[in-house]
Amino acid sequence: MEFNWKNWNLGGKIIFCSACVALISLLMKWVDLGVFSQNGFAQQGYFLLPCWIYPLFVLLKGKKMNVFGGIIPSVIAIIIMISFISSKGINEEIFGDVVNVNVAATGAWLFLFASVALLIGVLKYVPIDELKASFTHSVNIIKGNVDKIKKDKNERVIHSEFPLSEKSNSYGNKENALKKLEKLNELKSSGILSEEEFNIEKKKLLSYIPVNHARQDTSDKAELQNDDFDSVLQTIQKLSQLREQGILTEDEFKSKKEELLKNIS
């Protein structure tokens, strides 16, 4: 470690000075009731001195400082000191009126000033480019986590709303798929689903729509064909309505219509 005041930038000098001020403030009154007072050591203010350890270590070593490694301790010290000073209010009766008096003394306020100076020193010590890069990186991480949480939430909504399985691709599922396409569109319109998520789930639901009773065993084939024919016409009509609503594209409608018509040919 080396004390090199001349080579320190403004931020480094502020960090060092703030540490000196913090130490001096501990010798001063932190609480003053007039007839009774206590200094920073009696009020255990020395527990906040470790907030200066990392910034001072980096400064004396002449190393690069981790932005958040310096910011977080200083912010903690500021929050604790604000809470400490705010908690020192007492009610006093003056000329018949009850008045709230704060008995936090000069030393406590000076330590708060030193904590704020530490934060400023850290921000000044780190080059502006590195500071911007660190904040940008942190914002991207937070944004990525938020997007991941949102995506997981959307997937849970989709699976709970559309519990279709390939093993049960029945006529009832076909009817449900048509209704759920409209529900998907509502989720997209409300911003719960993105355009990409909507298209992926739409493709899955469209796969449940074709009617295929070829494997069913029945003696009345004519009746089955009539049922299939009516079902296909109703499905095509519903798909046409979805196309008019903008849920299906023209190509999706034509492709699905051709697929359905093949089942009755």
Image: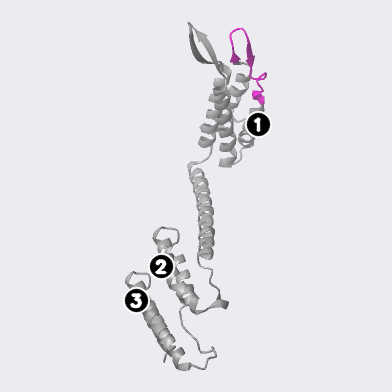
Residue at image x 54%, y 23%? 86
**Drawn side of residue 117 relative to residue 62, left or right:** left
**Of pointers 1 and 2, the one earlier in the residue sequence:** 1
Does the magenta portion include 35? yes
Label 2: how many Cα within 10 Å (few below 14, some 14–19, many 20+): some
Residue 182: give its label. 2
> From which residue to which does the magenta span run?
31-46
The spot of residue 226 in percent (x, y) is 42, 89
Q: Residue extending furthest left? A: 244
Whether the magenta-drawn stretch holds residue 38 is answered as yes
Circle 1: is it few (<14), some (14-19), or many (20+) Cα within 10 Å? few
Q: Earlier in the sequence, mark 1 or mark 3?
A: 1
Q: Amino acid at mark 3?
A: Ser
Q: Is residue 193 above or below residue 110?
A: below
Q: Amino acid at mark 2?
A: Glu
Q: Label 1 belongs to which residue? A: 50
